[in-house]
Amino acid sequence: MTHIPHTLSTPLDPPELRKAFGGFVTGVTVVSALDGDGVPRGLTANSFTSVSMNPPLVLVCIDKKAASHQVFSQATGYAVSILGADQRDISKLFASKAPDKFEHCATFTAVTGAPLVEGAVCWFDCEVHKSVDAGDHLLLLGEVRDFHHTTGIPLAYCRGNYIDFGLEQEAVGTGRNLVYGAIADSGGRVLLTRDSPTGRWSIPCARGGEARAVQSEHAPGGLPRTLEALGAKVALSFLYSVFDEGPDTLIVYRGIVQNETNPTATIQGAAFFSEAELPWEQLASSQVRNMLRRYFVERGNDRFGIYTEAAGCGSVAMLEGSPTPWAQHARSLDSTC
Ligand SMILES: Cc1cc2nc3c(=O)[nH]c(=O)nc-3n(C[C@H](O)[C@H](O)[C@H](O)COP(=O)(O)O)c2cc1C
């Protein structure tokens, strides 16, 4: 859209302003509280933000048009559940006007009694610190009384679309072999394993069927088990790359090695390499080489994209509008926000 300069007296165009606000990438939460009769109420909210460490404060903005607005305006406490990549249905449920949202969602309580969503990647249980009337919204500042965090992959939202960093789900069912890999980083050195017949190096991988294993710190097997067998305790975080390599589709996550490792030791054909030490010419494929080159550049800039490639056409998918089949679903979702 061409930018037409405004003067201070020109009214802003609300649909365009809404679009501009929607260009901010957020997580997705369910904000919940108990009404005066102890009945749980909740809505999907992406207006959550952390505010202060001392005292520990968070903020959510509640639309005055929301049916639950009055409950929040009178509540003494509320809870915020940060939804995981696999909890879009929960987001849609709580964005709806269903009268019985909590009957379709497993919950638990912490300190204030407000319901928290089971399986949320992080949560905060808050006492209302202050509420501020702000235009068509109520700003609800909460003092955190209890919280929990996991390494689960969060759901994200931008321009009316859900963004699923766990794009691997879309690759399931393509008939290709799914292989889950990790760029396991220990202070700038990445863990590589050597294939015994070929002598070629690659990232640690686990064969498919255990896609969800990487999404939960509690999940057994799969990629975490492969990494543990190599002596590396790795906190896997975001999806980094999805690409085809022969009959395999590689789904690669970023991860930070948590335990002390000997950077120069070679254990079971595995070793850590800095960018300068890496055996670039002995890597398993050009795709792995390109991905690792990109990783070191992006690590240097502390700015990461998600690379996806299918049928030879690749792109660094920055959230909305990725041309890959794995991300197309993100566009089709409707939203009330
Ligand atoms: C991704 C997303 C984010 C949203 N964020 C907010 C928000 O921050 N504040 C809000 O009041 N409504 C937000 N909404 C809209 C409410 O979830 C929606 O209006 C809901 O139906 C309100 O529920 P209620 O009427 O039962 O209270 C959001 C919806 C979506 C899909």
Image (spheres, rainbow, N blue to C red):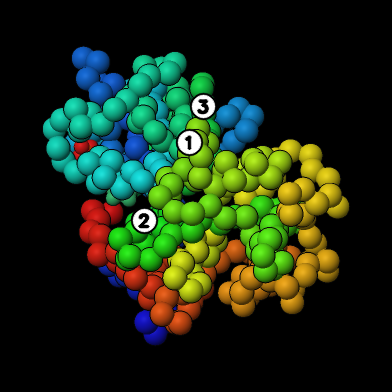
Question: Mark 2 or mark 1, which is nearer the start of the sequence?
Answer: 2
Residue at x 67% of width, y 69% of height: 198
Q: Amino acid at mark 1?
A: Ala
Q: Is residue 172 left or right of residue 213?
A: left
What is the count of numbered marks? 3
Residue denoted by label 1: 219
Residue beneath the point at 73% across and 53% down = 270
Q: Quadrant of residue 195?
A: bottom right
| Observer-nearest of 194 and 273 | 194
| Residue on which the image places disc 2 | 169
Q: Residues within 10 Å of mark 1 (few under 14, many from 20)?
A: some
Q: Amino acid at mark 2?
A: Gln
For residue 147, which numbered disc appears in the image? 3
Question: Could you tell whether 269 is left or right of 99 in the image?
Answer: right
For marks 3 and 1 on the same chain, the one whose residue lies earlier in the sequence: 3
Q: Find ligand 1 in the image and state its quadrant.
A: top left
Q: Which of 69/215 is in front?
A: 215
- Between the C-alphas of marks 3 and 2, the distance is 29 Å
Query: Tag 2 or tag 3, which sits nearer the N-term?
Result: 3
Is 201 on the left-hand or right-hand side of 169?
A: right
Q: Residues within 10 Å of mark 3 (few under 14, many from 20)?
A: some
- Residue 26 x, y percent position in the rendering: 44, 53
Dot 3 and dot 1 residues touching (CB under 8 Å): no
User: What is the x, y in percent for residue 24?
Assistant: 45, 60
Residue 85 in the image: state x and y as whole percent: 40, 48
- Any mark on residue 23, and which? none
Above or below for 271 versus 249: above
Residue at point 60% right, 64% down? Answer: 304
